[in-house]
Image: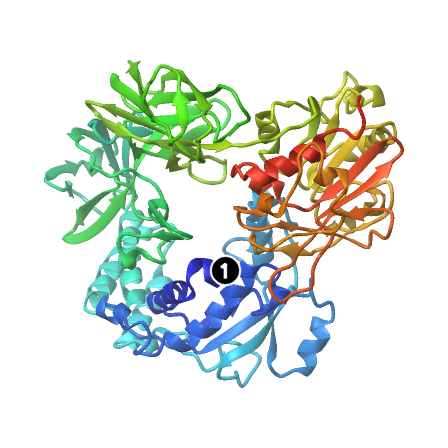
Amino acid sequence: ESFEKWGKQEVLSDVVRVIRMFRPDVIITRFAPDRSAGHGHHEASAILAEEAFDLAGDPKAFPEHLKQGLEVWQPRRLFFNGSTWWKKDLAEIAKNDPDWFSVDVGGYDPLLGLSYTEIAGRSRSMHKSQGFGAAETRGESLEYLKLIKGDRPKTEDIFEGIDMTWGRIPNGTRIGKSITSLCDSYSTSNPEKSGKAIRDLRQLLRGEVNDPWVKRTYDQLGYMYASINGIALDLTTSSFYLCEEDTLKYDATGILRNTQGLTGPIPVTFGRTSFSYLPWDGKAVVADWILPPPNSVDMPYWLKERRGNLNLVESSSLIGLARLKNALDLDFELSIVGEEVPYTLPVLYKWVDRVAGERIRPVYVTPVASVIPKTDVLIARGGPQLVSVEVEALTDTLRGELTVTAPPGWLMAGSTSSTLSMGVTINKRGEKNSFSVRVDATAEAIPGALKFAFVGPKGTADRTLHEIDYPHIMPQVYYTPAEVKLVPLDVKTTAKRVGYVKGAGDDVPQAMEQLGVAVEFIDLESRGSTGSPRQISLEELKKYDAIVTGIRAYNTTKGMKELHPFLLQYVEEGGTLIVQYNTTPRFFSGASDFQIDPATLGPHPFTIGRGRVTVEEAPPTFLDPKHPLLNMPNTITAADFEGWVQERGLYFATDFGTNYTPLIAWNDPGEEPLNGALIVADHGKGRFIYTGISFFRQLPAGVPGAYRLFANLISPRTAR
């Protein structure tokens, strides 16, 4: 399915291109090219790696790369990194199979004072969104690699026979000796004494910079030369956003802190602007000037244009780059004792936090405004409904109009056409105007997007700015179209008030509000005066027509152990409990991340499996067509499963016996049907439901049938 959605040749071309750019000797895949990889994307990555390994060295494969300046490159070896997580006996297998090699990745780096597995633990713990916090281990840590392609090493060293020295490139032996000499003679107390050796080495490399590794080393040496002389350069400004139509003052600050190696002014050239640092007084010199920013909004280059399931880039030469320079990154040359050192510096915004101290972040070029709809989807159930939107000024003195365009069959209050305009007047950057648009679906209304666009003398804006900001990374920005998906839908629910327990994060609560349901979060984190968790009572839960637990709530939400017995009592006394998917338990230091005994998740035992249906078009089979959940208050048909996104579901139930009724079966092509996506058990006066259906994807995407089915799930079994 991945290849079908992406286009296999398009993505294979990308992989071959990156190999030719990076020119690796050894490639290691993390996943196998079969279903043991878990996800289809994982499996596809291994298939692509194996095919690209052979094609990267073939001049007949993707010849357009060669016309664009790349050269063919044949890696020596391709390994698969097996895992003892999946194969507990992998160590024994590796001992007896000559295709398997073991590598100790637990080595210690005395310069860093850390083992590589300590660093790996810190890195994995930065994977916040999936709760991948990991220990920082020390000592031996073996990884197992299976040779898939290439020549078999004659020893246990996976790099055996590969020249790992500078001798592999023309004139490399001389370069290698110069680098060794430079490292051996380097003095940490007098680093400026290495200045001449660095200049001589750069001169030696200058004639060989067509080789990518030489070019990288050449550039690094330039920065080293400035560093050993204590040169510090900063470009700062007074705001972290700059509108593409604005101009702004930049402060360039430079200081030479190590005055032993150099004397006299150091010329610096920024484009047409030149000035000198005065190194002998040890003080920073500030130069002010105004530059118009380029007419380019900063965002990830691979998100600028999308066609179908692929993100397009404006130039194939960008493929493989993590990011481009920001629009305000400035290139300049620093001339030190006749040595021209090319520099690229970002323009930064600096401030002081009273707790964290000095903080920095990049300065991004933005549109003149961010247009922010307050919802992504509007489910039109009949009658006029309000859509709220804000216009945030990203420049001072923003004047213009917000234009709203509706799809055919939709009426907007205050307009006799499909377009409505409202005046925008904002004086200062960061301030907002708020608007409400009343829309009503006629009998001829079709699904479509309600589109918003700002137009004014300073420029236009039809996107919403989003910022990703965590303590361990620099803030990043990206944009989405400023629009609301309008969905005319015949849907009913008898639920009026629903309690929601937060899980790993999803937008299901907001979707239920679209159904006209009042959603209240069940707070498990509040603590009393003694510091102990707040006690939840059965009487408090009885006020809800239904209770829904968020995805992976039993894996991630503290307090579920204490809440769960009350949830089962709530069901027994007439409540409806919907448990969205949880993952199979994971163990850390011998302890499970599952908050309860998994066998007690429902009123009767069942197992959370790893089954999933990835093809979102997989046809459903109704196993109990007359069951109330498929008929009340909405009659669910095969048409309700059209237009789904990404997948049908995951982590389906298994081993549920006869105490649960499975309602739907489906399967990926060539696989056996799975019937654990939606199981239900009537218990006492109430109803328990476990579902692996990916409502957390379908409801925010405005999938009509998913709303109709979910409306049935939350509708109470009996009047309450």
Circle 1 Cα neighbour tier, 10 Å, few/some/many (<14 / 14–19 / ≥20): some
Instruction: Please say whether residue 588 is visible from this viewpoint.
Output: no
Residue at (83% x, 22% y) in the render: 537
Q: Quadrant location of residue 254?
A: top left
Judged from the image, the secondary structure of the residue bearing numbered disc 1 is: helix
User: In the rendered image of this protein, does residue 189 appear above or below residue 558?
Assistant: below
Q: Is residue 171 visible?
A: yes
The residue closer to the viewer here, 135 or 467, is 467
**Relative to 537, residue 269 above or below:** below
Closest to the observer, 252 or 59: 59
Depicted 78 relative to depicted 645: above or below: below
| Quadrant of the image containing the C terminus | top right
The reply, left or right, for residue 366 in relation to residue 335 is right
Left or right, 381 with reference to 400:
right
Q: How many marks?
A: 1
What amino acid is labelled 1 in the image? Answer: Ser
- Left or right of residue 391, residue 254 in this image: left
Residue 391, x across and y down, in percent: 36, 21
Q: Is 706 left or right of 296, judged from the image as shown? A: right
State the residue position of label 1.
2
Decide which of 356, 695 is in the foreground and name it: 695
